Amino acid sequence: MMEAISVIVAAVAAYAFGAVWYMTLAQPWMRAAGVECGPDGKPVNKSVVPFILSAIAMVVVAGAMRHVFGASVTTTGAGLTAGFRLGAFIALPWIVINYAYSGRPATLTLIDGGYAVIGCTIIGAILGWL
C-alpha cells in the first residue's frame, strides 16, 4: 500500500512542478513548439486532453521508476541520484534524438528536456524518501 501512495505522491509532485515549469516558460515554449495563439496570446486549442494525458503519464513514470528502484533505493539521496540519472541519461537523450530528427528548435529541447530531468529527479527523491 505504501508503494502505491509513494507513486501517487511522486507523480503529483512531478506534475505540479511541470505546471510551474511550463507556466514560467509558457511564452518561449509556445514559440518553440509552434503553438497557435489567439490575439490574447493564449493557445487557440484549449483541450484538457494534454493535461489528463500528462497526469496519467506521471503516474506511469513514477510507477515504472518504483519498479526499477525496487528495494535498492531506500533514501532520498539515492532516489534523487537515480531519478536524475534516468532523466539525464535516458529521457533527455531520447528527447534530443526525436527533436533533432524532426528539426525542432533547441529551445524546445532544453525546456522539455529540462522538465524530464528535473521531473525524474523529483520522482526519484520522493520514492527514495517514502
Image: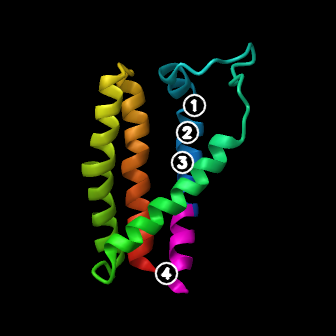
Q: Where is residue 11? Give x, y as percent.
A: 53, 63
SS at circle 3: helix
Which residues fall within the magenta stretch? 1-11
Q: Say which element carries label 1.
A: helix
Among the two numbered marks 4 and 3 on one chain, the one whose residue lies closer to the N terminus: 4
The answer to whether 53 is drawn above or below residue 68 in the figure is above
Q: Residue 26 shows which numbered tag?
A: 1
Whole-angstrom CA distance, mark 1 to mark 2, is: 5 Å
User: Residue tagged by mark 2?
Assistant: 22
- Horizontal arrangement in the rendering, residue 65 relative to residue 59 (left or right): left
Residue depicted at x 57% and y 70% = 8
| Amino acid on which disc 3 is placed | Gly
**Mark 4 or 2, which is nearer the eye?**
4
Is 12 situated above or below 29?
below
Q: Earlier in the sequence, mark 1 or mark 3?
A: 3
Circle 2: residue type? Tyr
Tag 3: Cα neighbours inside 10 Å, few (<14), some, or many (≥20)? some
Q: Are marks 4 and 2 in contact (CB under 8 Å)?
A: no
Q: How many numbered dots are placed on residues in this image?
A: 4
Instruction: Kindly identify which residue carries mark 3.
Output: 18
The residues bearing labels 3 and 2 have C-alpha atoms spaced at a distance of 6 Å
Camera-side residue of 13 and 59: 59
Whether residue 34 appears in magenta in the rendering, the answer is: no
